[in-house]
Amino acid sequence: MIICIGAGPGDVGYLTQRGAQLIREADVVAGFDAVLNVVQSLIPADAQVIGMAYRDQVAQLDEVARLHHAGKRCVVVFMGDIHFSGFQYLERVERACGHPVESLPGISSAQILASRAKVCFDETTFITFHRRGDLDPFKRHLVHVLQDQRNAIVIPCPWDAARSFMPWHIAAYLLENGISPDHPVEVWENLTRGEAEWHGSLLECASHTCSDMSIMLIRTLAPMASQIEAAPVP
Ligand SMILES: C[S@@+](CC[C@H](N)C(=O)[O-])C[C@H]1O[C@@H](n2cnc3c(N)ncnc32)[C@H](O)[C@@H]1O
């Protein structure tokens, strides 16, 4: 058995009960070191722990796949929810195993942000730049989302200088592409663990720096009016 589970946004209190049960019953628990730290208290003392970083993830996942094929119960833990900015890692797990792998959703940093900032998913588009490959289609999509008067929840890209696309780069890119400097922006850091929040305009965001563990909300300038029936007149 092998299953990929979302570990939640950082505080283990946000891990689902099903996720916690799967970790407690596992023979092998694998994942990036920072995510393993989140679920550390649930890992059985006799379980094998396979940590990894970007540089050795392929080799370490090959080892997890070998143990899975040898009949061990394996759990691979993902940051937040697998289904937002986690699919490339899922693809790596499936490539190592040679077959599709079951997944268990977790609570995403996007959900915590939506709750803190009181923003409705129905009127919001999710975009991540924290991925390998060509970011240009995602950049263009973000411009269209804002032109279409929707909110955007955005995961930035923190990697090396050549590729990094952090909130200040994102703001500068949007301004260059004709998006109004007046859009309200929020940047939230370390949600559920010593949170920090920043509020300002898109223009101000272009000179606001933050840590890698940040997620961004760009609000539409034209929020939807309520579409429920008018309140009864007292
Ligand atoms: C590869 S993405 C994974 C996102 C994850 N799948 C999710 O659903 O939250 C990692 C990035 O998500 C953002 N992130 C994840 N957890 C966060 C948190 N607790 N607070 C703020 N940002 C977070 C950061 O930008 C981080 O670099």
Image (tube, rainbow, N blue to C red):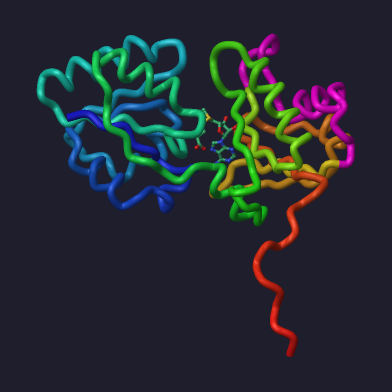
* Residue 100 against residue 59 in the figure, above or below: below
The quarter of the picture where the C terminus appears is bottom right
Q: Is residue 181 magenta?
A: yes
The residue shown at (21%, 40%) is 44
The residue shown at (84%, 30%) is 206
Residue 57 picture location, percent across and down = 39, 15
Q: Nearer the viewer, residue 228 or 42?
A: 228
Query: Is 17 on the left-hand or right-hand side of 8?
Result: left
Name the dominant secondary structure of the magenta segment.
Answer: loop
Q: Nearer the viewer, residue 218 or 12?
A: 218
Residue 3 picture location, percent across and down = 26, 32
Q: Nearer the viewer, residue 8 or 55?
A: 8
Q: Is residue 69 magenta?
A: no
Query: Is 17 on the left-hand or right-hand side of 48?
Result: right
Tally the marks. 0
Residue ranking furthest to the front = 229
Which quadrant contains ligand 1?
top right
Residue 171 picture location, percent across and down = 80, 29
Q: Nearer the viewer, residue 187 or 11?
A: 187
The residue shown at (59%, 28%) is 128
Q: Quadrant of residue 205?
A: top right
Q: Magenta span covers which residues?
A: 158-182
Query: Is 178 on the left-hand or right-hand side of 123?
Result: right
Residue 84 picture location, percent across and down = 50, 33
Q: Quadrant of residue 144?
A: top right
Q: Quadrant of residue 228?
A: bottom right
Residue ranking furthest to the left = 71
The residue shown at (71%, 42%) is 150
* Residue 220 against residue 136 in the figure, above or below: below
The quarter of the picture where the N terminus appears is top left
